[in-house]
Image (cartoon, rainbow, N blue to C red):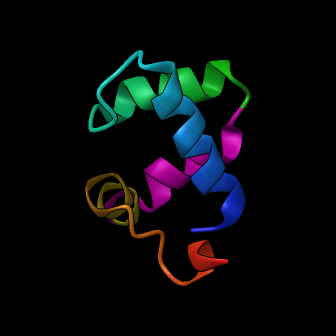
Amino acid sequence: MNKTVREQILAVRATGETNMLDTRMAQVIADRMGFYELVVFIEEHRAEYFNFILTGDAGEEGAE
């Protein structure tokens, strides 16, 4: 996960509009906010997304 996607996840979470485990709603909010990288990331890397939501571990790239 790169820094941009990590920051976008945190921004969507900060809205408080959805449970972040509701990936469809998280994608709707991300799309509305112009976070297209996050919309695609959730589709292509669902396991990594859930891991970050549940553990806060962003992987090696997110450790920057």
Residue 52 location (% of width, % of height): 38, 60
Q: Is residue 12 visible?
A: yes
Quarter assignment of residue 20? top left
Residue stretch in magenta: 35-47
Relative to 30, 48 lies left or right: left
Q: Residue at x 29, y 27 (%)?
A: 19
Residue 6 location (% of width, % of height): 58, 55
Q: Residue at x 68, y 23 (%)?
A: 33
The residue lying toward the viewer, choosing from 43 and 9, is 9
Q: Residue at x 26, y 55 (%)?
A: 54
Residue 3 location (% of width, % of height): 68, 63
Tell me: residue 42, above or below residue 29: below
The residue lying toward the viewer, choosing from 25 and 9, is 9
The residue most toward the bottom is: 60
The question of residue 44 being in magenta is answered with yes
Quarter assignment of residue 32? top right
Tell me: residue 60, above or below residue 13: below
The question of residue 38 being in magenta is answered with yes
Quarter assignment of residue 2? bottom right
Residue 18 location (% of width, % of height): 35, 21
Q: Which of the image's four quarters has the C terminus?
A: bottom right
Q: What is the chief secondary structure element of the magenta stretch?
A: helix
Tell me: residue 37, above or below residue 36: below
Q: Is residue 39 visible?
A: no
Relative to 27, 31 lies left or right: right
Q: Which of the image's four quarters has the N terminus?
A: bottom right
Tell me: residue 15, above or below residue 13: above
